[in-house]
Structures are given as structure tokens and as C-alpha cells.
């Protein structure tokens, strides 16, 4: 089936972030439901982030020919689905360690490669990237809300034995999992994730009306090396700054849902809170040109840092619903404004630096930094509980003084 290329791309973003809207807010809850303790949850989430780091930094750059992007996305979607299915067959920490690494390794490159596809297509025909990308944020809102609602609803009991079919299958783990309220308790998280990743793969199998074409990236003999890139003071300061700002989300990503659950909030309310943060993200992404047309990357990073100190400070001191609403609205500052600053800084670099810097930013800020802090958060949450969010506020503070001084071009260019 042939579909418009922008529809294909938007569907890819939608299904990816629909899956991520389940995995990111609720995977710690699923792990807890499987009997995993807080320190091991932190380790498992942390190694997942390390795998995301490796996937973005190593796998993404291997696709040098833009014409191969579609096939690469399909293959990665298939591998991600296979590892997602692996969660059904065991809950021993060693097995989960292996599956978490595999799933995140192949799931993480999907966004940078989709962005690369978008960039390739923008050179072939004109379209508004923002209006396509926003479908990812919309999907996150829908899935995180829906998952919370379904988890709060009464479970629907469904057992293989009720089918009166005599199958000689030794998959006891699979049978028990399906038989124990598949559509209830924490099992709904895994069921929902499997459904959404499957939908992502099926969407990838559609054929876009315009196939990507372009020069092979390896042909660029002037591509800058990592060493040359990091030798520039403004670059390493930028990377360290955004890594700290994004890493400070680790406590929230890993234990936000568990923390709010312990405070007495239902799964549906927790889902709505996560969705509220992404709604704020959607608004800022949509109106970023009007809001920040004249802002430099340095000033955007300052705004993001201030929002981070306020957000994580509040999160560690109050679980009152009005405060939580403010905390979640501040997501547009801690995450979105930081990401806009990064895109502005990177977009102002020389052409032969952009791909390398984009991959490094995705790997460090969106993977490595969060991975390290997730593992730290796992051990600290057992000891200090809500105090972990105060630690996240302290992680942000150095970023306020590390902001690069080099001004970047406007995003409106």
C-alpha cells in the first residue's frame, strides 16, 4: 500500500512515541510488579539507557546511504518487537538485563534515523517538519493517558484454560502471564507495549510515495572527527550542559510514577500527569518560532536550567496535586526548551559538523547522562526517597555556568 511520504513519516513518529509513552512512564511500575527492588530497577533502567546511548552513537551513523533509511527503520522495528516479546518469557534479573539491552539498543536509533529521513525528504520536497513531528508528542499524550486509565480499570480475566483447547505447550510463563488478568494490574503495561510496537512495525511496512534519495554520507571527506569537534571549548561546554540538564530527568523517568503511586495517586491520574507534561511540550514546540525567535542558544539553556532547579526542587518537597500540575507544566522548560537550544546550537554549526554533533548530542544527553543518573537514582531512592529529586536539582546547577558563549543562528532561518 502506497501512502504520502509525510503521512508515512508522521505515522512512524506517532507509533514510536505511542510505544515510548507506555515504556517511559510505566516501565518502572511493571518491573516493580514483577518483584524487582528499587536498586535493581535503577540498574535495569540505567543499562537500558546505556543501550540507547550505544544505539544512537553506533548504529545510527552506520546508515550512510539515505536510500537505505526505510529498510533500516523496518529492520530496527522488527528487532525491537522481537526483544519486546522477550519480556513475556521471564522476570529473572539476568534475563531482563539482556532483554532491556536488546530492546533499547534497537529501539533508540529509530528517532535519529527518522529525523535523518525527514532531513533527506526536505531536500526532495517541501513540508513543515514541526507539523509532522508534533504527532509524536500527541501520541505520547494519548498512550500515557490510556495506559493509566486501563491500569486503573477493573481487570478482564482471560485464561487459556477457558478456551477448552488441549495444547501441548510448555510455555508455562506465557500461559501464566496470559492467564493472570492480561488486561489488568501491571500486565496491561506489557500487553500495551507489545501492541504498540507491533503497530509501529506494520506502519513501517507501508510504502511511502516518494522514496528517499541522496548522496552517501561517507563521501564527505571533510567530515570532522570527534577529537576535532570536542577540542572546541564551546562544543564540549554545550555537550556537558545539555547532558546535565537532560540527566536531571533520571529521577523523574525512573521513579516518578512509583513516587506518585506511593503518595496515593491512581494509575490514571499518573498517566494524566505525564500527559500534561507532554501537552506543554507540544504547545512550546508548536509556537517555538513565535516564542523564541530572537533567543540565543545560551539564553534558552539558562531558561531550561532555571526551570530544572524549580521543577525538581518542587517535586522533592510536595505531592499536592496543584503543585504536581505546575511541576508537569515545567516539562516544557526542562526538556523542550533544552532540546530547542540544542537544535539551535547544532543548526548553526558548519555542515560537515552537524551529523557528528547531532549523533553525539543524542547519545550523551538523551542516553549516556540519563543512564548514569538512573543507576545512581536507583540506589539513592532506596535511601532517601523523595530526596532524589533534590539531588536532580543539584545536578542542574552546574549547567547554569557551563553554557556556551557562542551565539547560534535563529531557528527561523
Image (cartoon, helix red, strand yellow):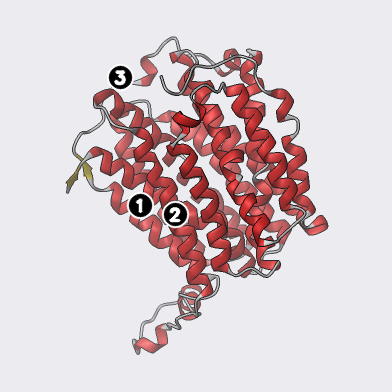
Q: Mark 1 to mark 2: distance in Å?
A: 8 Å
Residue 103 appearing in the image:
yes
Query: Which sits earlier in the primary sequence, circle 2 or circle 3?
Result: 2
Regarding mark 3 in the picture, which secondary structure is present there?
A: loop
The circle on residue 284 is none
The circle on residue 215 is 3
Proximity of marks 1 and 2: CB atoms separated by less than 8 Å: yes
Residue at 51% across, 74% down: 173
Q: Which residue is mark 1?
A: 200
Q: Spot the residue most to the top.
A: 222
Residue 147 place in picture, x, y as percent? 48, 64
Residue 166 place in picture, x, y as percent? 35, 87
Residue 141 place in picture, x, y as percent? 46, 54
Q: Mark 2 to mark 3: distance in Å?
A: 32 Å
Q: Which residue is mark 2?
A: 19
Left of 107 or right of it: where is 54? right
Q: Nearer the viewer, residue 276 or 259?
A: 276
Relative to 9, residue 24 above or below: below
Left of 394 or right of it: where is 340? left
Amino acid at each position: 500500500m502506497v501512502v504520502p511520504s509525510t503521512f508515512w513519516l508522521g505515522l512512524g513518529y506517532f507509533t514510536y512515541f505511542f510505544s515510548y509513552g507506555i515504556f517511559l512512564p510505566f516501565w518502572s511500575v511493571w518491573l516493580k510488579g514483577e518483584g524487582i527492588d528499587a536498586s535493581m530497577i535503577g540498574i535495569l533502567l540505567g543499562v537500558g539507557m546505556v543501550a540507547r546511548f550505544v544505539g544512537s552513537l553506533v548504529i545510527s551513523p552506520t546508515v550512510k546511504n539515505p536510500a537505505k533509511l526505510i529498510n533500516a527503520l523496518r529492520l530496527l522495528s522488527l528487532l525491537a518487537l522481537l526483544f519486546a516479546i522477550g519480556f513475556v518469557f521471564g522476570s529473572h534479573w539476568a534475563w531482563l538485563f539482556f532483554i532491556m539491552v536488546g530492546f533499547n539498543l534497537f529501539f533508540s536509533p529509530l528517532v535519529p534515523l527518522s529525523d535523518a529521513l525527514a532531513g533527506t525528504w526536505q531536500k526532495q520536497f517541501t513540508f513543515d517538519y514541526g507539523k509532522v513531528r508534533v504527532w509524536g508528542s500527541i501520541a505520547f499524550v494519548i498512550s500515557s493517558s490510556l495506559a493509566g486509565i486501563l491500569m486503573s480499570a477493573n481487570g478482564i480475566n482471560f485464561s487459556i484454560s477457558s478456551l477448552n483447547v488441549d495444547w501441548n505447550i510448555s510455555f508455562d510463563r506465557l500461559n501464566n502471564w496470559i492467564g493472570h488478568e492480561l488486561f489488568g494490574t501491571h500486565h496491561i503495561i506489557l500487553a500495551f507495549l507489545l501492541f504498540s510496537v507491533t503497530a509501529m512495525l506494520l506502519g513501517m511496512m507501508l510504502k511511502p510515495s516518494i522514496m528517499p534519495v541522496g548522496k552517501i554520507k561517507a563521501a564527505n571527506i571533510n567530515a570532522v572527527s570527534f577529537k576535532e569537534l570536542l577540542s572546541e571549548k564551546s562544543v564540549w561546554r554545550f555537550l556537558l550542559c545539555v547532558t546535565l540538564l537532560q540527566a536531571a530527568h533520571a529521577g523523574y523517568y525512573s521513579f516518578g510514577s512509583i513516587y506518585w503511586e506511593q503518595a496515593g495517586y491512581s494509575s490514571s491520574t499518573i498517566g494524566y500527569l505525564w500527559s500534561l507534561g507532554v501537552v506543554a511540550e507540544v504547545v512550546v514546540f508548536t509556537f517555538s518560532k513565535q516564542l523564541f525567535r530572537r533567543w540565543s542558544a545560551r539564553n534558552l539553556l539558562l531558561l531550561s536550567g532555571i526551570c530544572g532547579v524549580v521543577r525538581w526542587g518542587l517535586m522533592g518537597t510536595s505531592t499536592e496535586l496543584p503543585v504536581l500540575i505546575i511541576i508537569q507544566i515545567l516539562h516544557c522548560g526542562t526538556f523542550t526548551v533544552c532540546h530547542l537550544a540544542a537544535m539551535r546550537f547544532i543548526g548553526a554549526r558548519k555542515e560537515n559538523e552537524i551529523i557528528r554533533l547531532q549523533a553525539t548530542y543524542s547519545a550523551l544527553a538523551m542516553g549516556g547522562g540519563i543512564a548514569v543518573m538512573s543507576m545512581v537514582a536507583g540506589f539513592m531512592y532506596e535511601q532517601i526517597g523523595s530526596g532524589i529529586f533534590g539531588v536532580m536539582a543539584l545536578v542542574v546547577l552546574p549547567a547554569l555556568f557551563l553554557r556556551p558563549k557562542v551565539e547560534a543562528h535563529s531557528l527561523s532561518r
